[in-house]
Image: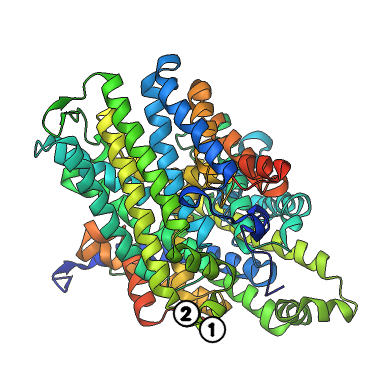
C-alpha cells in the first residue's frame, strides 16, 4: 500500500494532445470560457449586489492562488488562511493606522503574505505529501495565535472601520460600483497571472514535479527551488485576495486566519475542480453563494460543507469544471 | 524559601503537572494517528472530532442513562470505535487506491460533519462532567497538592500507551499488523484477512482517541470544539516525532507537553506557539522527524 500511482489531480488532466496553445496559452475552449467570464464580470454588478460579487471575487482569487499549488505542483497546503488573513491584517493596518492609499495597502499585504510564505514554504517543502499538509496547518495555527496576541491585529475585535480611501490618491472608492471595478480588475489580473505562470516554461517544470518529482530531479531541476517559488507566488496572491477583502469590507478579523478558512479554500477548489483553470472560480462562486443563502442556519453550514467534502472526494473528484470539461472533451 | 529558578515551587510543579497531562493527551492522540497511518496510510483528520465524541459519549451515558465514569471508560471507546468502523467500511475503504491526500480531505469532511452536528445539538458552550467520587480530592506531596484525578489521567495514559506498544511490538497480532504495514499483499497471501484487520485497526485507533476524550471530560469542559484545536498541536507533535515509531510518538507527546508546561511558567505568551516553533527547528535540523525514517 506504500506506493500509490494515482496522483491527486490525475482525474483532471485530459490527454496532452489538447495542450495546443492558442492565444496566450489558452485553448479555444478556454478562450470561450474566458470570454464568458469577462462578460459576466462586466454585466454582473448591474444584476447582482456588488458587495456580494466583490466577496465572491476575493475568494475566487484566493482559490486560484491555492489551486496554483495543489493543482499544478501537487502540494496540498492546509494553512493558506495564514497568508489570506495576514494580507488582510497588514492592508487594513496600513490603510487605517498609516493612512496609505488602497493600492499601496494591498501591495503591502501581498508582500507580507509573500514573505510569510517564503518562511513557511521553506520549512514545509522539507517534507512531502501528508506531512506537507500537516506542517502548513501547524504553521498557520502559529500565525493564528500570533494574530490573537499581537497588538496591531486588535485580538478578538480585529481591525474595524478600515477606510477604502482613494485609489492612487485620486479616485474615491466609497461607492460600491467604483470599488467593484477595482476588485474585478485585481481578480482578473491575478487570474491571468496564474494562467500565465502555469503555461510558462517554469509552469511546465512545476507540472513535471507534480507528475514525478524524482524524474524532474534527475533531469537536473532543483525541484525544491521550484516548489518554494510556487509556494511564495501562491501565498502572495492569497495575500492580495485577503488584502482586497479587508479594504472592501473595512474589517480584518481572526476568522480569516482560522484553520476553518484554510479548509474552505480547499473545499472551493475541490468543488470547482483541482488543477483546472476555471474550477477555483466556479467553486468559490458555489461556496460563497451557498454561505450567503444558508447564513442563518448556523452550524448546519459546517455540516453541509462537510457533506460536500465527502461527496466530492468519493464520487466527484474532477469537480464541476472538470466534469464539464470531461463531458465536452475539452480542457477548461 | 521554596523558589526554584526564581519561580515559586508550587507554580512550577503545578504547570509541570498540567504539561504532563497535556502531554498524556498528545501521546494518546499521536499514538492513535500513528497506528492508523501505519496500516491505512491515511492521516485521520477526524481524530480530534472522535476525541470529542468520546467525551460526549461519556457525558451522554451519565446524563441520559445514568451510567457512571468507570463503565463509560470502557463503553464510550467501544461505541465511538464502532462508529469509526462504520465510517471506514462506508467511506474510507473506497480511497485506498488513491493519493493519500484524498484520505486527508475525506476525514476532514467527516470531522466537519461530526463537529457541526454536535454544535447544533449541544451548542458551543461547555457541559460539565463531574470527577468520579473515587478520584476526587488531592494528595499532599509535600511540595505541592496534586489533584488525584490528574495523577490518574497521567497514569492511565501511560498504561494505555505502553499496552498499545506491547500489543504491536510483542504479540502475534501485532506482528501481523507490522507485516501488513510493510507489505499488505504478501500478508494477505499468507491467509490473513487484511481488509478486516485494516477496519479493526481504524476502529482501535479511533477508540484510543475516545478513551482520551473520556479521560479529558472531567478536566476540560465537554464541548464540540475541544478536539479541533488539540488535534492541530498533535499534528505538529507527529511531525516532530515522525510516525514511524510507536514508542517515539509516546515519548514525543509527553516531552512536548512538559516543554509546553514549562514555557507557561517562564514565558506565558509563547506557550501557545512553542510546539510549532520546536516543529520548525526540528524540520531544519532533522527533516524526517526525531524518530522518523527518511
| Residue A312 position in % (x across, y down) | 66, 44
- From the viewer's perspective, is residue A77 above or below residue A35? below
Residue furthest to the front in view is: A22
Q: CA distance from mark 1 to mark 2?
A: 6 Å
Task: List x then y, in percent, for residue B272.
Answer: 31, 57
In the picture, the quarter occupied by the N terminus of chain A is: bottom right
Q: Residue furthest left?
A: A98
Sequence-earlier tag: 1 or 2: 2
Classify mark 2: helix, strand or loop: loop
Q: Residue at x 54, y 49 (%)?
A: B132
Q: Do discs 1 and 2 belong to a common subunit? A: yes
In the rendering, which numbered label is found on residue B288?
A: 2
Q: Circle 1: is it few (<14), some (14-19), or many (20+) Cα within 10 Å?
A: few
Chain at numbered mark 1? B
Which chain letter goes with mark 2?
A: B
Depicted A94 relative to depicted B80: above or below? above
Count neighbours of disc 2 (C-alpha within 10 A) and say few if under 14, some if 14 to 19, many if 20 or more.
many
Q: Are marks 1 and 2 in contact (CB under 8 Å)?
A: yes
Q: Position of residue B129 (x, y in %)?
A: 51, 42
Q: Residue furthest right?
A: B191
Residue at the location (29% across, 31% down)? A182
Q: Secondary structure at mark 1?
A: loop
Q: Which residue is mark 1?
A: B293
Residue B32 position within the rendered picture, expressed as x and y whole percent measured from the top left? 60, 65
What colouring style does the render use?
Answer: rainbow
Amino acid at each position: 500500500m506504500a506506493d500509490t500511482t494515482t496522483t491527486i489531480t490525475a482525474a483532471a488532466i485530459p490527454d496532452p494532445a489538447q495542450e495546443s496553445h492558442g492565444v496566450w496559452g489558452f485553448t479555444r475552449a478556454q478562450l470561450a470560457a474566458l470570454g464568458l467570464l469577462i462578460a459576466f464580470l462586466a454585466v454582473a454588478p448591474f444584476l447582482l449586489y456588488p458587495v456580494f460579487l466583490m466577496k465572491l471575487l476575493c475568494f475566487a482569487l484566493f482559490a486560484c492562488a491555492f489551486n496554483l499549488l495543489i493543482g499544478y505542483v501537487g502540494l496540498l497546503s492546509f494553512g493558506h488562511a495564514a497568508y489570506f488573513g495576514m494580507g488582510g491584517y497588514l492592508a487594513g493596518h496600513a490603510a487605517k493606522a498609516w493612512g496609505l492609499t488602497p493600492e499601496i495597502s494591498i501591495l503591502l499585504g501581498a508582500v507580507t503574505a509573500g514573505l510569510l510564505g517564503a518562511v513557511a514554504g521553506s520549512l514545509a517543502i522539507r517534507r512531502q505529501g501528508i506531512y506537507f499538509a500537516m506542517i502548513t496547518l501547524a504553521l498557520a495555527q502559529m500565525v493564528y495565535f500570533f494574530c490573537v496576541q499581537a497588538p496591531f491585529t486588535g485580538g478578538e475585535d480585529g481591525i474595524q472601520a478600515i477606510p477604502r480611501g482613494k485609489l492612487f490618491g485620486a479616485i474615491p472608492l466609497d461607492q460600491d460600483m467604483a470599488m467593484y471595478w477595482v476588485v474585478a480588475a485585481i481578480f482578473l489580473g491575478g487570474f491571468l497571472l496564474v494562467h500565465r505562470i502555469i503555461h510558462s516554461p517554469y509552469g511546465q517544470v512545476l507540472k513535471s514535479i507534480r507528475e514525478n518529482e524524482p524524474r524532474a530531479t534527475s533531469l537536473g531541476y532543483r525541484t525544491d527551488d521550484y516548489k518554494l517559488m510556487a509556494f511564495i507566488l501562491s501565498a502572495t496572491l492569497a495575500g492580495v485576495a485577503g488584502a482586497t477583502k479587508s479594504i472592501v469590507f473595512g474589517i480584518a478579523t481572526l476568522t480569516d486566519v482560522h484553520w476553518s478558512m484554510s479548509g474552505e479554500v480547499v473545499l472551493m477548489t475541490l468543488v470547482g475542480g483541482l488543477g483546472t483553470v476555471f474550477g477555483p472560480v466556479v467553486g468559490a462562486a458555489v461556496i460563497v453563494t451557498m454561505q450567503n443563502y444558508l447564513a442563518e442556519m448556523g452550524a448546519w453550514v459546517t455540516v453541509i460543507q462537510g457533506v460536500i467534502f465527502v461527496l466530492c472526494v468519493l464520487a466527484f473528484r474532477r469537480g464541476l469544471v472538470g466534469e464539464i470539461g470531461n463531458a465536452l472533451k475539452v480542457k477548461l | 524559601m521554596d523558589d526554584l529558578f526564581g519561580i515559586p515551587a508550587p507554580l512550577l510543579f503545578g504547570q509541570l503537572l498540567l504539561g504532563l497531562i497535556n502531554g498524556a493527551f498528545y501521546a494518546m492522540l499521536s499514538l492513535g494517528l500513528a497506528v492508523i497511518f501505519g496500516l491505512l496510510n491515511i492521516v485521520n483528520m477526524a481524530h480530534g472530532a472522535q476525541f470529542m465524541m468520546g467525551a460526549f459519549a461519556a457525558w451522554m451515558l451519565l446524563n441520559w442513562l445514568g451510567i457512571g465514569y468507570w463503565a463509560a471508560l470502557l463503553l464510550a471507546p467501544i461505541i465511538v470505535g464502532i462508529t469509526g468502523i462504520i465510517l471506514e467500511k462506508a467511506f474510507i475503504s473506497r480511497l485506498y487506491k488513491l493519493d493519500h491526500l484524498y484520505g486527508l480531505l475525506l476525514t476532514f469532511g467527516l470531522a466537519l460533519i461530526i463537529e457541526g452536528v454536535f454544535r447544533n445539538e449541544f451548542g458551543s458552550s461547555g457541559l460539565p462532567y463531574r470527577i468520579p467520587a473515587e478520584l476526587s480530592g488531592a494528595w499532599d506531596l509535600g511540595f505541592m497538592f496534586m489533584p488525584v484525578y490528574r495523577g490518574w489521567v497521567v497514569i492511565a495514559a501511560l498504561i494505555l500507551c505502553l499496552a498499545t506498544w506491547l500489543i504491536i511490538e510483542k504479540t502475534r497480532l501485532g506482528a501481523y499488523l507490522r507485516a501488513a504495514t510493510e507489505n499488505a499483499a504478501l500478508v494477505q497471501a499468507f491467509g490473513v484477512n487484511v481488509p478486516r484487520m485494516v477496519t479493526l485497526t481504524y476502529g482501535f485507533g479511533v477508540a484510543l482517541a475516545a478513551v482520551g476524550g473520556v479521560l479529558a471530560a472531567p478536566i476540560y469542559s465537554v464541548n464540540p470544539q475541544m478536539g479541533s484545536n488539540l488535534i492541530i498541536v498533535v499534528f505538529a507533535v507527529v511531525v516532530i516525532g515522525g510516525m514511524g515509531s510507536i514508542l517515539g510518538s509516546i515519548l514525543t507527546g509527553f516531552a512536548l507537553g512538559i516543554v509546553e508546561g514549562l514555557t507557561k511558567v517562564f514565558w506565558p505568551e509563547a506557550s501557545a506557539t512553542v510546539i510549532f516553533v520546536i516543529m520548525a527547528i526540528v524540520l531544519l535540523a532533522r527533516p524526517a522527524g526525531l524518530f522518523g525514517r527518511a
